[in-house]
Structures are given as structure tokens and as C-alpha cells.
Image (cartoon, helix red, strand yellow):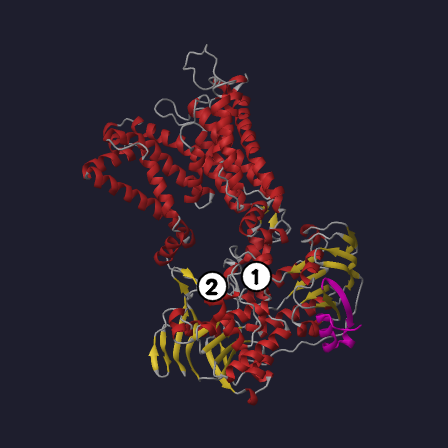
């Protein structure tokens, strides 16, 4: 049994943990839910020895212990699988698992022993992992299994999973929970950090809710509902989006037999005032589609029409000029520059136009004014224009990107994974912006790996598989099972 | 303001530490009195002998050293800016030395072979040097954008080509000074008086207009990156090329343009050396000002004004360094100081942590 008592942790002037006490019983499946910044990860990082609490104690079976490093936590049987994996892609599964405590032969690594041991661990878990396979060749779901094997291989008794399903397909997530449930029945203690309430309710034996650095309540999954949990997390009733019928206008995007690297003969049409959802398993051409439409990837054949204009070649500047806005899947790779300030990031892409420029010069006053307008209207916190973009939390970064792209008054909005990694309130805020955009007559191309999201938002839905658009559904005929079959390529259409 | 001060710590602390460390090294080797005398002489040679000036009222005691310091600082500033401009867009211009070499030769040739009034002749020499330097940087730039050749490799190779071409062939071969000259016959022909960079003061000081040029260049570069939208686009390319591309910035064009500007700045540095100090392309340029530019850019943290200030400091120390010899300390000691400072700058994280401790955050961290 692990007992966290009165833990408090401050960063600068911000309280991340405020007198948090939590008991973790051996063998239970505890879910830790809360919005981004509620303190879930901070709490677990304290338990994992990454942060030192300012006050409070951690006791293992009644013995107060200071965990100064993750190694100390590991020695106490606490392991953690981070949301962003800590694997070396160029090493094999076995090498990754034994990294840091390698079996040795003389001065060298005893690779064959490592392989046998890792194979044994995998077998005992029921994982089908080849110890010789390179990590870079594995799917995201398999890589996560490697992380779990890595933890359990070290004899971990308490396993912390930080947002494990954020990167998984629905099938992989189901499998993960099945495996974890089995492990838990064999005596492993599992702590799940999540804000997907559905999975929390089906998986956990106990749920602790955090809000603004405090533990606000503990409930059992039988005694609660998703609505009640959401309310506890955000402190008020969660807004529920409505879906008004679409009033489609002129075509803002059309592809006719477009081919590119990763796309095969894709034809589709998107009208102003509707949301076209793209569903599919990760890596089936969705990203390539968004890149072609936004000018980031050349197409090799076919006809592309953007905002009524046929384009033979498209580059990002031209796409923007035609009225295309883009919210890419990876914020910090394409949309935001961590080392630029919030206001500089707001100007990015339109930095040569008013109100961000006066002739060739940067319009500092105009930029500041527009930034304040946007961060206040979109509840970006903290609303500080001079803060580094990288200092914002993920949810606030995304709100900033969405606010910026919509501020350009686009005719076509291309969004890829708009709510990945966001908490409930931020997810709903972003979705509400997309719905509003649709009502204002913008065409929205929505790509998401979260099928629930596509189903919730789209007026029409196109399923992508192996770079092709394989099926189209109207909102009235959305059939989750059939869509899933098309995604996996097993439907008989 | 606090932010600015904090940003300076990672540059200032290494320079001060290095000065102190080198001073202590002399103390250990030669004793306190030699160390004090030698460093005193170096500082007097660098920043002027102010106590003696107050005693005797001879302005030359201050102006002469400051002039030498300014002339050295001008060249360091220009090569430092060359490296810094490339650095800001994410490129390592190791080729400032080669660009400076061809720039110096271009200035020497145009300065000696063309006969024009000064108002046209001097600018023409500078322009020729800028074009030569830019041309020398063009090949690495084009190779980088079209073939993905890393600029570090190609600019280093271009350095060797420049030195071999200029110093091992042209200056001792086709462009060798004609024997009729009164002066020594090594190097190229003397430049015409109309091509010389004018001196700023009569008499005492040899300070020439190169420093004005360097300060102007620093201000222009500073304003470009800080004030203009185009400069903003360049910075984004340096920080995150993928985001720059998505924002509609033509990354390839920016890379080529930045390398051309970098080359031009190094070329002009060569011109300032020839038109201000040497009056011809000598047998060899002597000090590796192009490589010093890398040090200036790093010590100045890629910031134009930072480069200017560091260059003024090290230009002065270099100028004062010659006086160290009087005390039996080698004149290259300032280069040792520069080298140590550079080594210490690499420990950037340590200085940033120190800066945060010295000037604590008022703004809470959010996340």
C-alpha cells in the first residue's frame, strides 16, 4: 500500500499540488482524472521521483520514504509509462527493455540472454513482440507494449500509465485495457491517468478526481456517471454540443482523382457550411490529404480545386491567400514556435499583413492589440502576449492556434486531430469553434483518429484506407460498426 | 529590462571568468607584480592609458590605443555579424574566413587597378568585396538547398579553396605587385588613395571609417531581425523551418539570401582590412578574423548588438595584447582569453541557471 499524505508542490508562484492525500491499495486499478493542469501528472511525477514535494510525505507500507530519483521509485516497485515514449527507435525491443540494467558477459552486453529473458516476459504477459524487432518498425500500440514490458521486466509492482490511449486506435486501446486488467488480476497495481471518462468508468475500480491541484473527490465507478465525473472535474456542468442541420453552400474544396505520395485516386468534395470528417486508422493517407490541400505536399496527378480556383501547384503561401487555414496535428512542429512569444506566434503566417505589419515593419502595437483580443476571446491562459509559446499548456497552445487560424476568416479550414491531448473543457471549446465556423459558412475538413469526434462533428464522413477514400457516409446513415469495418478494410461494400 | 539583463549573463560571465582565469594563470607562472603590470599594460593598450592622460594631458595616450582597438573591432564585428546572420536562420557559416579572403582580394584589386574619384572609388571597392564574399557563399547555399549538402562541410572546403587560390597563386602570381613600387614588393599593388577608408581623426589615432561601417551594419542587422516582418520570417526559419514553411515562408529562398548576406558581410570585413589597415592584399592576411567571427557570434549569442559589444571588447584586448610582450607574456594572450570564454559559453545551461538565480523570475511558470 502506498500512501501520499498532504503533498504540496509549487512551481514559481503556481501551486501544482495543494495538500493532496491519496491512498493506493495493492492490486487496485485507480484512475486519476482531471483537466490539463489539474495536477494529475505532477502528483505522479512526485510518486515517480521526478519532482520533490515542497511538503508532505510518501509512505510505502507505512514507511515514510523520500524518492529523490526515478531509480529510487523503481527500487520501490513504482514504474511509469509516459505519454511520450522513452524508447530508442534504432535499438531492438530486447535492447530497449534491458537498457540501464543490461545482463553482462564480461565487459559486453549478453544480448542472447537479454533476448531470452525479454521473450519470457513478453510470453508471460501474452504480448506478441519479437525481441529482435527494431522499435522504429513497430506500431505505436506495440511500442507502448514495449514500455509496459520494460517496466514489468524490472519487477514493477505499481504501474502508472499516463494518458495511455491518447496515441492508440480504438482497437489498440481495447487490447491495452484487456491486458492491463489481466495484469491487475494477477496482483499488479495500476494507476491510470486519463480524461477519457468512458474508459475510466469501464476500467477503474476506484476514481480520484483532481481539480486545480486539489483532490476534490473519490468515487467508485458504480456510483457515478460520465456527467457527474465531468462536473467534478471542471467544477460545473459540462457543455454539450448540439448539431444544427447543415446548410451547404458552394463547393470550397474538390479533389478529382488526386494522387500524391500516400494518396491514390482520391476524389471528394466539401461545401461551404459543412464539416467533412475523415475517418481512418492512423497512417492511411489522412495526413497526406491535409498536406496536399494546404500546399505542404505536392500532388502528382488529378485535379485540385480550392475556393473555386483550380490549382496546378499549391504552396502554403498560395493556399493561405486562397483562404485556407490549417490546424495541423502536431502543434509544436508546424503551428507554433516554442521559442517565439505568444504574440509572435499569433502573427505567424500573416506577419506581413495588417494588423501585424505596417509596410515592411512589424506593427508592434497592432500585433499586441490583436493578440490580446484573441487570447481574451478564446480564453487562452495566461493571457500574456510576451510569454514564450512553449510555456503554455498543450490545451492553451491549441486554443491559440485555432484562434489564430480562424482569425484569418478562412473559406476552408483544415484541421487534423484538433483535440488530441486536450481536457474536456478545452475539447468542447475547440469543437464549439468548429461548429460555429461551419454555421458562418466555412467549409471544414476534419481529420481525426478519434472516431467519436468525427461522428460528433461531421455532416458527412469519408473513410480512408491505404491512401484511398473507400466509403462515404451521410450523417443520417452513420453506422459505427460499418465505418469501423471500412477502416480496417474488412467491409464487403 | 530584467529579461535583457538575464539574457546577457551567459555572455558576460564567461568573458569575466576567462579574464580572471587567464590573469591567475599569469600570476601562477610569473608572480603578482608581472601579472598586474602585464594586464595593466594590456588594458592601457586596449582602452587607453587614462591615468597618464590625466597627468600629462596628452590626448594621444587615449586616442591611439582606442583607434587600434576600434580598427580591430570593426573587422571582428563584420565577420561576427556574418556568422550571426547565418546562425539566426539556423545555418553555421564556418566560411567567413574564405569569404573575407576573396572580399579582401576584390577590394585590393579594385582599389589598385581602377582610377576613380574617392566618392565612387571607395564604395565601388566595398561593393566589389561584398559581391565577392556573397559569391563565395553562394555555392554552399545553392548546394544546401538543392542537394542537401551541409553548409558546415561546404563552407570549410570553400575556405581552403579561397586561401589556396588567393594566397598561394593570385597574390604571388598574376596579381603580384609590380617591382616599380617604392614600398615592399610582397603582396598586391598598393591601393589608390581614393580607395582608402578615411581616418576619423587627424594625428594621434589611426581609427578609420571601418568602425562606422561596422556599427551601421550591426544596427541594420539588429533592426532587420527585430523590426521588420521579413526579419521575423528569417528568425522563424532558424527556430523551426517546418513551421516557417507552413506559415508560407519560402525556406529555401531565405537560406540562400541569408548565406549571401553573410558572405557579403564577411567580404566587407576583408575590404575594411585592406582599405583601412593594409592598403593592399599582403602576402598573408595574418589573423584568422573569419574564424574569430564564429567566436564573436557565439559570445554575442547571435544578436547583432551582442556581437558589436563583444567585438569591441575583444578588439580592444587584441590591440592591447601587443604590449604584453614588454613583460614577457606572449601577445596572443587575448586569443587565449577569447578561447577560454568561448569554451565557457558552451556551458550555457549553467549560466542560464545562474541568471535565473541572480535575477529570479517574477512571472510564474504556467503549464
Question: Farthest residue in the bottom direction?
Answer: A223
Q: How crowded is mark 2: few (under 14 residues within 10 Å), some or many (20 or more)?
A: some
Provide residue A36's location: percent of width, then percent of height: 53, 71
Q: Is residue B252 at least partly visible in the picture?
A: yes
Q: Is mark 1 on a helix, strand or loop?
A: helix
Q: Does the magenta stretch include residue A7?
A: no
Q: Quadrant of residue A43?
A: bottom left
Which residue is labeled 1 in the image? Answer: A136
Closer to the N terminus: mark 2 or mark 1?
2
Which residue is labeled 2 in the image? Answer: A111
Which stretch appears magenta?
A466-493
Q: In this view, does B321 lie to the left or right of B283?
A: left
Provide residue B295's location: percent of width, then percent of height: 42, 41
In the depicted structure, whether residue A388 falls above or below residue A64: above
Q: Is residue A473 magenta?
A: yes
In front: B226, or A418? A418
Q: In this view, does A445 lie to the left or right of A226?
A: right
Subunit under mark 1 = A
Provide residue A298's location: percent of width, then percent of height: 71, 52
Q: Which of marks 2 and 1 is in front?
A: 2
The C terminus of chain A: image quadrant: bottom right
Q: How many labels does the image show?
A: 2
Q: Is mark 2 on a helix, strand or loop?
A: helix
Q: Residues within 10 Å of mark 1 (few under 14, many from 20)?
A: some
Subunit under mark 2 = A
Provide residue A357's location: percent of width, then percent of height: 60, 49
Amino acid at each position: 500500500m502506498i500512501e501520499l499524505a498532504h503533498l504540496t508542490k509549487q512551481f514559481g508562484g503556481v501551486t501544482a499540488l495543494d495538500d493532496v492525500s491519496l491512498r493506493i491499495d495493492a492490486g487496485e486499478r485507480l484512475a486519476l482524472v482531471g483537466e490539463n493542469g489539474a495536477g494529475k501528472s505532477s502528483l505522479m511525477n512526485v510518486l515517480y521521483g521526478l519532482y520533490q514535494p515542497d511538503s508532505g510525505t510518501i509512505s510505502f507500507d507505512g514507511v515514510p520514504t523520500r524518492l529523490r530519483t526515478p531509480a529510487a521509485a523503481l527500487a520501490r516497485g513504482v514504474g511509469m509509462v509516459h505519454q511520450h515514449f522513452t524508447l530508442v527507435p534504432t535499438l531492438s525491443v530486447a535492447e530497449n527493455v534491458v537498457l540501464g540494467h543490461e545482463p553482462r558477459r564480461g565487459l559486453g552486453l549478453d544480448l542472447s540472454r537479454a533476448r531470452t529473458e525479454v521473450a519470457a516476459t513478453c510470453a508471460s504477459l501474452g504480448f506478441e513482440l519479437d525481441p529482435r524487432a527494431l522499435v522504429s518498425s513497430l506500431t505505436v500500440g506495440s511500442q507502448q507494449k514495449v514500455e509496459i514490458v520494460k517496466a514489468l521486466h524490472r519487477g514493477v509492482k505499481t504501474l502508472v500509465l499516463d494518458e495511455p490511449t491518447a496515441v492508440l486506435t480504438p482497437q489498440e486501446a481495447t487490447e491495452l485495457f484487456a491486458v492491463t486488467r489481466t495484469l491487475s488480476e494477477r496482483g499488479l497495481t495500476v494507476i491510470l491517468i486519463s480524461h477519457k471518462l468512458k474508459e475510466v468508468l469501464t476500467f477503474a475500480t476506484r476514481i480520484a478526481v483532481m481539480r486545480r491541484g486539489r483532490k476534490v473527490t473519490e468515487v467508485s465507478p458504480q456510483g457515478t456517471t460520465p456527467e457527474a465525473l465531468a462536473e467534478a472535474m471542471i467544477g460545473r456542468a459540462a457543455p454539450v454540443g448540439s448539431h444544427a442541420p447543415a446548410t451547404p453552400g458552394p463547393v470550397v474544396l474538390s479533389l478529382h482523382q488526386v494522387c500524391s505520395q500516400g494518396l491514390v485516386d482520391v476524389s471528394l468534395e466539401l461545401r461551404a457550411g459543412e464539416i467533412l470528417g475523415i475517418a481512418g486508422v492512423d497512417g492511411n493517407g489522412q495526413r497526406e490529404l491535409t498536406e496536399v490541400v494546404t500546399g505542404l505536399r505536392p500532388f502528382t496527378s488529378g485535379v485540385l480545386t480550392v475556393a473555386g480556383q483550380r490549382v496546378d501547384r499549391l504552396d502554403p503561401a498560395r493556399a493561405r491567400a486562397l483562404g485556407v487555414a490549417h490546424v495541423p496535428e502536431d502543434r509544436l512542429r508546424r503551428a507554433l514556435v516554442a521559442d517565439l512569444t505568444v504574440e509572435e506566434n499569433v502573427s505567424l503566417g500573416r506577419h506581413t499583413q495588417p494588423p501585424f505589419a505596417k509596410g515592411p515593419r512589424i506593427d508592434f502595437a497592432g500585433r499586441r492589440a490583436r493578440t490580446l483580443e484573441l487570447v481574451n476571446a478564446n480564453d487562452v491562459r495566461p493571457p500574456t502576449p510576451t510569454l514564450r509559446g512553449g510555456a503554455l499548456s498543450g490545451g492553451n497552445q491549441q486554443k491559440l492556434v485555432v484562434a489564430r487560424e480562424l482569425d484569418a476568416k478562412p473559406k476552408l479550414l483544415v484541421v487534423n486531430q484538433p483535440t488530441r491531448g486536450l481536457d474536456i473543457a478545452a475539447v468542447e471549446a475547440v469543437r464549439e469553434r468548429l461548429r460555429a465556423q461551419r454555421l458562418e459558412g466555412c467549409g471544414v475538413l476534419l481529420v481525426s483518429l478519434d472516431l467519436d469526434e468525427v461522428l460528433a462533428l461531421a455532416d458527412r464522413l469519408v473513410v480512408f484506407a491505404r491512401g484511398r477514400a473507400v466509403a462515404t457516409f451521410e450523417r443520417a446513415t452513420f453506422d459505427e460498426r460499418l465505418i469501423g469495418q471500412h477502416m480496417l478494410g474488412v467491409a464487403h461494400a | 529590462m530584467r529579461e535583457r539583463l538575464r539574457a546577457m549573463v551567459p555572455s558576460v560571465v564567461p568573458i569575466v571568468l576567462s579574464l580572471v582565469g587567464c590573469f591567475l594563470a599569469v600570476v601562477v607562472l610569473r608572480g603578482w607584480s608581472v601579472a598586474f603590470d602585464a594586464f595593466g599594460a594590456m588594458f592601457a593598450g586596449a582602452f587607453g592609458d587614462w591615468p597618464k592622460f590625466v597627468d600629462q594631458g596628452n590626448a594621444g595616450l587615449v586616442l591611439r590605443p582606442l583607434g587600434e582597438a576600434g580598427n580591430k573591432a570593426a573587422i571582428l564585428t563584420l565577420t561576427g555579424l556574418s556568422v550571426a546572420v547565418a546562425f539566426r536562420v539556423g545555418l553555421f557559416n564556418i566560411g567567413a574566413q574564405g569569404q573575407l579572403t576573396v572580399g579582401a582580394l576584390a577590394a585590393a584589386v579594385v582599389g589598385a587597378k581602377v582610377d576613380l574619384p574617392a566618392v565612387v572609388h571607395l564604395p565601388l571597392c566595398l561593393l566589389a568585396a561584398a559581391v565577392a564574399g556573397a559569391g563565395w557563399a553562394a555555392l554552399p547555399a545553392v548546394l544546401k538547398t538543392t542537394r542537401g549538402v551541409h553548409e558546415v562541410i561546404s563552407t570549410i572546403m570553400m575556405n581552403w579553396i579561397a586561401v589556396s587560390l588567393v594566397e598561394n597563386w593570385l597574390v604571388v602570381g598574376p596579381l603580384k605587385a609590380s617591382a616599380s613600387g617604392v614600398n615592399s614588393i610582397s603582396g598586391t599593388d598598393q591601393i589608390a588613395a581614393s580607395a582608402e577608408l578615411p581616418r576619423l581623426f587627424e594625428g594621434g589615432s589611426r581609427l578609420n571609417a571601418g568602425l562606422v561601417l561596422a556599427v551601421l551594419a550591426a544596427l541594420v542587422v539588429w533592426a532587420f531581425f527585430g523590426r521588420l516582418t521579413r526579419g521575423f520570417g528569417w528568425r522563424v526559419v532558424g527556430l523551426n523551418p517546418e513551421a516557417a514553411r507552413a506559415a508560407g515562408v519560402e525556406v529555401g529562398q531565405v537560406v540562400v539570401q541569408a548565406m549571401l548576406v553573410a558572405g557579403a558581410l564577411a567580404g566587407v570585413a576583408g575590404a575594411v582590412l585592406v582599405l583601412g589597415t593594409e592598403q593592399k592584399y599582403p602576402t598573408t592576411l595574418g589573423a584568422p578574423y573569419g574564424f574569430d567571427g564564429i567566436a564573436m557570434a557565439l559570445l554575442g549569442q547571435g544578436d547583432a548588438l551582442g556581437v558589436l559589444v563583444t567585438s569591441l571588447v575583444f578588439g580592444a584586448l587584441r590591440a592591447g595584447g601587443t604590449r604584453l610582450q614588454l613583460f614577457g607574456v606572449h601577445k596572443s594572450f587575448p586569443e587565449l582569453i577569447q578561447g577560454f570564454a568561448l569554451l565557457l559559453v558552451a556551458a550555457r545551461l549553467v549560466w542560464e541557471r545562474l541568471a535565473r538565480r541572480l535575477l529570479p523570475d517574477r512571472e510564474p511558470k504556467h503549464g
